[in-house]
Each structure stands twice: as C-alpha cells, then as structure tokens.
Amino acid sequence: MFVSLTACFDGNGSGSSLNTGDDNPDVIASLAVTSYAPTDGATAVGTNSKVVAVFNKAMKPETLTQNSFTLQGAGETAIVGAVGYNADTRTTTLAPNGALTPNTVYTATITTVAEDESGANLLNNVEWSFTTAATTDTAAPTVNTSSPADLATDVLRNTKVNVTFSEAIDPATLSGTSFKLSKNSDSSVVSGNLRYVNPTTVVFSPASVLDDSAAYTLTLTTTLTDLAGNSLVLSSIGFTTGSEVSSSPATVDLGTAGNYVILAKTGISTTGTTKITGDIAVSPEARTAITGFSETLAPDGTFATSSLVTGKLFAADMTSPTPTQLTTAVSNMETAYSDAAGRLDPDFTELGAGEIGGLTLDPGLYKWGTGVLVTSDVTLNGSASDVWIFQIGQDLKLEDGKAVVLTGGALPENVFWQVAGEVTLQAGTTFNGIMLGQTAIVVKSGAVINGRALAQTAVTLISNDVNEPAQ
C-alpha cells in the first residue's frame, strides 16, 4: 500500500532518512518540476518569503543558479538572492537578499538550463506567479491534517505517516530530528524514510512494520519552519496500532459493464483517427449519440460496426435484446462506482495534496476530497494480483505527455479510478486503469487508454488508441 520510498539518504543520526523517491528503472520519465511554493496565483504572500520548487529527479546542483532560477516583480529587475539545491528533498530554493516589494505580482521561472544527474534538461521553462502581501509573514505554520489522525486506534501496523501543513515548509528544516516517530513504551525512535512530497506534505515510511497494539507518537519540532522562517509550534500526533497488516483491497466488480471498453450514458464522440479495441455502448441515449464513427448497422439491428472499432457498437434504440442488456450494464456501472466510492478506511488520504506526479504508489486504497493532478509520470508498482482504488472527490487530470505507468507486473484491470468530477487526459498522455467517472471523460489528441472509460455522462475522443484489458 502507500507510497513506495526508496533510494534513501542516511546521515541525520536519528534513525530516519530523507528520500524523494527513486527513478524507476522500468520508466524513463522526463525531468519535471512537480510542485512549487508559493503556488501559482497565490495572494498575500509575505514579503519575507523564499521560493521553492520540487523536482522528480536528482539534479546537478551547478545547473541551478541565479541565471536558471529567477524571480522578478512586475516592472522590476530580477531579484538577487541565493539559489541552492537540497539533494535530500530534490528541491531548489531561491532566498531573496532583501524583502520583496509589497502588493506586487512576482513571476518565478526555472529555465531549461536546469539539468538532472543523467544530463537531461527540462523540456520547457517552468513559470508561475504570485502576489505579495503588504507586510512580512509572521504567522506560524500549523498541522492541517495527519494520517493516522491524532488519537487514532487500531492503526494498521504497516501504516505510513502523512502530515499536511497549513503552508509550505522549508525543505532545509526537514530531518529525522524535526519529524520523529517514537514508541511510547521505551522512547525508541522508529527508523525509516522521510519524503518531501510537495511543499506542504511530508510522509514518513517506517523501515519495518510497527509493533502490535503499541502506542506511538510523532513529534514535530520547532526546527521546522515555513518559507518565511516562522517556526512550527511544537506538535505531537499520537496513535495506537492494532494487530492487522494491510493488503490490497478487493477488486471492484464491474458486472456486465466490464463487457465494454467504453460505456457512457449521454454520448460517445470522436474526431480524427481513433482506434478502439473492444465494444463500446451508449444508453439510455439512442445511436445518434454515437458520433464520428461512420458506423454501419448490422442486418439484425442489434449492433453496429465501424472501421475505427475492433469490436461492436451498441445503443439503447437497437433491436432486442440490446436495450435490456445495456440497461443492466449501466446499472452495473453505477453500482461499481458506488462500490469504489464507498470503500472505507483508506490507506492514504489527501496524498500530495492532490499532486501525485513523480510518485510510485504501492497497492491500496487512496482517497482525496479534492481533485488529483498528474504533472509528471506516476508509477503503480505491484504484482499481477495487486489492486489499486483511487477515490477522487473532484477532477482528475493528466497533463500533456504524462503517464500512469504500471511496473512489477501490475495490470490495468486491477486499477480503479473513481472520479466524482471530470476526467481529462491531455494530449499525448498514457492512462492505465478503469475510469469510473460520474461526469465527463475527455481524451485529448494522441492520448492512449489501456483500460476502460465508464462514464455516467459522455466520453469525448480525439485521435486516440483505446485498448481493452482482460476481464
């Protein structure tokens, strides 16, 4: 379950090592900035704030300088300040020499000069903007949420501890002494790995399962500061383990909805040269809701064919028994959505504050009340029998050219994306898994789906490859 944390750095003397995830040898992902702070569009940023960005790969420090990482206010010259790289957290930080101008829009830019250890550069400049406040930031950061929650009981023994802060934390202040898990009975420090997922989210992964029915305390010290240097108030989170160790969740039963690679209630449309392997269907709408396929109705009227589909096309106004079969399939699709959405006791909640690009995710149940964004490749690593269920309260979006990558034998038919909002696969993306969408599924030019698109509204395609997995 949880986020796989490897390629450790050890040397903080506390039994914990910082880690930002290892490049998976099965995947060649482009160098990317996965998150940054202040965030794009942020307002009321203290005039004493630093700027930080997180990479998905280990970087060459010499390529991160005042020339490749700049900050400029509207109508001003570029800010002069120290630019540094933290290998433990794969972050670069720009610390201005003086205060920023109040009430001013600033633009941060990291150029394609930035280079990872393999010699690969950013494909494009990364740019974002924020607006300063009238004064400095003097507010102390706080803990927003944690998993396990404070005072939680019967916690899984292979839990990983996820803390989300109220604002960005300075990565230079994160260590095994400022973020420490201890066993209450003997005050022993739990060894493991720390992960700076993004500027507001930190994950601790114990090196081994925790003891049965034991009390633990996570201590967050005042050494942790925000980007303005304000110290976190000394905080602690206590929980007690149970006796269980988690395993993969049970698979989601698709019923007869699993007979279709695309199933939608209000329409399926395509433009360009789309290639679909598997059956597609729309119901309760009629065949006119399937557009762009130039389909031909079979002589018995029960299905249609298209040169774009290696399979059959079905609609609710076709000859019996098709309408009844589709009514059942749509009902099964809605039941599968409810099943996935209703799974309890997620292994991880609000991971990465919704940004999961660059992560490697082990099998398990993941839950977000917000949307989920993939700005660099995300990897699902597990065996052919492992299952992933993602509960997403808002939208799911893969940015241009990014991928959901399966390694270790993981199969797309065992990955379920339950999405309350819209699913958007930008141009050139590669998606693995079963989409259970409550609203629209929009697939941009050249995107590839290995799995199923099951939508309670419409599916829109543009020159895509859609490949049906095993049932």
Image: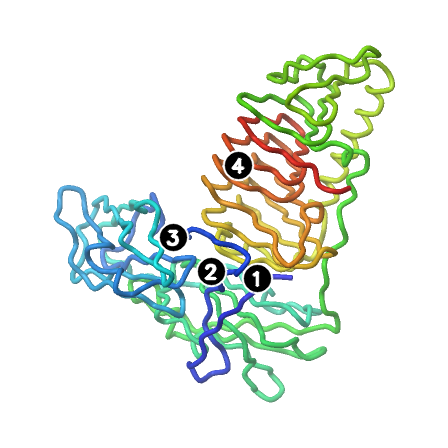
Give the class, few, some or many, for how many residues have Cα within 10 Å of label 2's Cα (few <14, many ≥20): many
Q: CA distance from mark 1 to mark 3?
A: 19 Å
Q: Position of residue 407 (x, y in %)?
A: 61, 56
Residue type marked 1: Val
Q: CA distance from mark 2 to mark 1?
A: 10 Å
Q: How is the image coloured?
A: rainbow
Q: Residue furthest right?
A: 321
Residue highlighted by disc 2: 197
Query: Total number of numbered labels?
Result: 4
Q: Position of residue 303 (x, y in %)?
A: 78, 18
Which of the two labelled residues, at mark 4 and mark 2, occupies the earlier sequence position?
Answer: 2
Residue type marked 2: Val
Q: CA distance from mark 4 to mark 2?
A: 23 Å
Q: Nearer the viewer, residue 127 or 134?
A: 127
Which of the two labelled residues, at mark 1 and mark 3, occupies the earlier sequence position?
Answer: 1
Which of the two labelled residues, at mark 3 and mark 4, occupies the earlier sequence position?
Answer: 3
Asked if labels 1 and 2 touch by Cβ distance under 8 angstroms, the answer is: yes
Disc 4 vs disc 2: which is toward the camera? 4
Which of the two labelled residues, at mark 2 and mark 1, occupies the earlier sequence position?
Answer: 1
Residue type marked 3: Val
Residue highlighted by disc 4: 425
Residue highlighted by disc 3: 33
Instruction: Answer yes or no: is residue 125 visible.
Output: yes
Residue type marked 4: Leu
Residue highlighted by disc 1: 3
Which of the two labelled residues, at mark 1 and mark 4, occupies the earlier sequence position?
Answer: 1
Please determine whether, in this image, residue 312 is positioned above or below residue 60: above
